[in-house]
Amino acid sequence: MVEKTNILEELERIKMDALSALAQVQDEEALQTWRRAYLGKSAPVMQVFSNIGEVPKELRRDVGQGANQVKQVLESALEERAAYVREAALQHKLTSEKIDVTLPGRKPISGGLHPQTKVLRRIFQIFAEMGFQVYRSREVESDEYNFELLNIPAYHPARDMWDTFHINQPGVVLRTHTSPGQIHVMRELAPNPVRAILPGMCYRYEQISARSEIQFNQVEVVAVGKNITFGDMKGTLNGFVRRLFNRDVHTRLRPSYFPFTEPSAEMDVECFVCGGKGCSVCKGSGWLEILGCGMVHPTVLKNGGYDPEVYSGFAAGMGPERISMLLHRIEDIRYFWGNDVRFRSQF
């Protein structure tokens, strides 16, 4: 028969052995080894709980209380020893490690504006000085505004100029350009004159390269009123370019085609990256296109709420990323949205 005295004496022995072993513990690894040995599932005191069913009923209460008291004593002793071990480790670290106070301090890393945000703000400032206001339009656009009201009807071959992202809902696209904003602002302000810029992100399903991305910023420029001429457009855009680059830069207008302007042109700026010698950014031409422009097509004026017999206007769409590439001699447009902090921290 199991005797109560024998069991309680065994519990006392277990407690003394455990406390003696704990007193020898000097580091965290040894502390964890002790915990597994004396408080783990296979520990002697835990086996008493597991085998309590083998103890006669009249002894179970006393044996259970005795085992629980030993377990509580060991847990309390473990907490005290753990605190001692941590404090000893800290003191050892403080006395053994040294700090070289002559080393220069490290400048904390701070956030900043994205380089494209800075360029966009500069563009806004220049056009504000010219009397243009900033107008925002939506990025998810209807097919009607993105194409049809801009003189690009359904199945027109000109739609091939824009590789469009469509969504599941028919007739809704991610805008391929900021030109739909022309219709929004004209319909809001007609028949009053318009002088506005419309910045925003655009999306096209294109091959990514050093000078092309599937998402990019664009800034639309639109002016509508009486007696506005192609010369007014050329003077406005040349004035903008000279203010932006702070120099007498060489520009050129090349005839082009856009369904929503007539006549249409593209403005190139001499490539600052290679100095006009030819590089991957300018495709070896020495010139970099920064915007498309032209006189607002009569159909677009009419769709915007203006009588094309009375009113005229010009529009332009520029790519701020390509402007940044010229300003900062950047050779790859993919850097802007690659989220590489080594690139962004330079600005």
Image (spheres, rainbow, N blue to C red):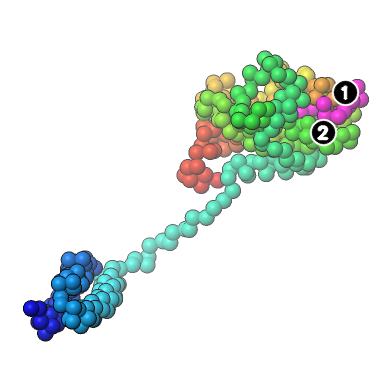
Badge 1 marks a residue whose secondary structure is: loop
Tag 2 residue: 186
Q: Position of residue 148 (x, y in %)?
A: 74, 23
Q: Tell me the residue at 57%/26% (across/down).
A: 205
The C terminus - image quarter: top right
* Magenta-tinted stretch: 303-316
For the residue pair 84 and 125, the one nearer the viewer reads as 84
Distance (Cα) linking label 2 and label 1? 13 Å
Q: Tell me the residue at 85%/25% (across/down).
A: 302
For the residue pair 211 and 151, the one nearer the viewer reads as 151
Mark 2 or mark 1: whose residue is earlier in sequence: 2
Q: Position of residue 266 (x, y in %)?
A: 69, 23
Going by the numbered disc 2, the residue's amino acid type is Met
Q: Tell me the residue at 89%/36% (across/down).
A: 192
Q: Residues within 10 Å of mark 1 (few under 14, many from 20)?
A: some
The N terminus - image quarter: bottom left
Q: Which mark is residue 308?
A: 1
Q: Tell me the residue at 69%/33% (across/down).
A: 141
Going by the numbered disc 1, the residue's amino acid type is Pro
Image position of 76 (left or right of 56): right
Among all residues in the image, which is located at the extreme bottom?
A: 5
Image position of 169 (left or right of 210): right
Residue 217 versus residue 152 in the image, above or below: below
Q: Tell me if residue 8 is in the magenta stretch.
A: no
Residue 248 versus residue 39 in the image, above or below: above
Badge 2 marks a residue whose secondary structure is: helix
Among all residues in the image, which is located at the extreme left?
A: 1
